[in-house]
Amino acid sequence: MSWFRRPSSTPLWQDEFSVFTADERYVNRRQFTKFLTLTSLAMFAGNLWILVRSWFEKPAAYPRQTVATLDELPVGGVKLFSYPAANDPCILVRTAAGGYMAYSQKCTHLSCAVYYSQAHNRLECPCHQGFFSIANGAVLQGPPRRPLPRIVLEQRNGRLIATRVEQETV
Amino acid sequence: MTTDPRQSRGLTAIDGAMVLIVVLLMVQIWLLSATLESFLAGNRAAAVPGAIISGILFAACAGLYLFVDRVDSEIRKG
């Protein structure tokens, strides 16, 4: 049994149009199936596009940027800054333990600005009550499914320097 | 209504194939959205398996379309 339809001697328009109701049911279904198959092809093309983009996209180059001096913030203090671009808001926190942690300020749910809750020692998104761990940016509660991107900090000559962004920290 | 049993069987087969294509297409749409979300989150590992599985689903849809086309050809032209 062949995969393909038998070669037809009838013109294409007769194949695609019929005045008989019984035949019309077949034509309608075949044309709709063709539409669904082309939609499937479009989905496949979309996946291929993502694949090609992932092959050719260069890894992001991050600048080194001073975000604060070491004695600038008290324990529990917060400073907002932008990194790596001017429209990438970030939050720097001097945690209760005395260390410094910095994260993107955009909630991974719907990009609301997160803030530091010193009482709970966590980052909180006021829009949908998404809570993130201050230790590693992991989701503690709420609708976000991905952790906050972490800004990697380096201490040098009494200054805190942002060196890169880690997308998946947990 | 279709009275010819041969035509009726053909329509049933085509309807079954169409339902299968719709199910495969829904999986493919979910796969594309999941792969895109993963890619935009900076994770590139999902791109290759996503493309391979999407290709397999498309091949299955194309196979079912050829089946529908062949049934249509055989039933309508005898």
Image (tube, coloured by chain):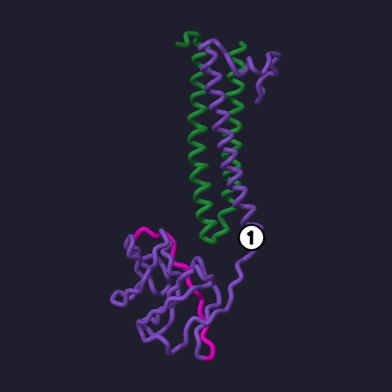
**Would residue A140 be found to the left or right of residue B50 on screen?**
left
Give left or right: position of A8 versus A157: right
x then y, percent, for residue B21: 52, 33
State whether residue B44 is above or below residue B27: below
Q: Give the left or right position of residue A118, taking residue B31 as reference.
A: left
Quadrant containing the N terminus of chain A is top right
User: Within the magenta stretch, is there residue A99?
Assistant: no
The answer to which of B53 and B25 lies nearer the viewer is B25
Task: Write down the residue under mark 1.
Answer: A57
Give the magenta range.
Answer: A142-157
Residue at 60% across / 33% down in the picture?
A: B62
Residue B57 vertical position relative to residue A25 in the rendered view, above or below: below
Chain for colour purple: A
Question: In percent of the image, x 56 and y 23: which residue is there?
Answer: A30
Residue A166 place in picture, x, y as percent: 52, 70
- Residue B25 vertical position relative to residue A55 in the rendered view, above or below: above
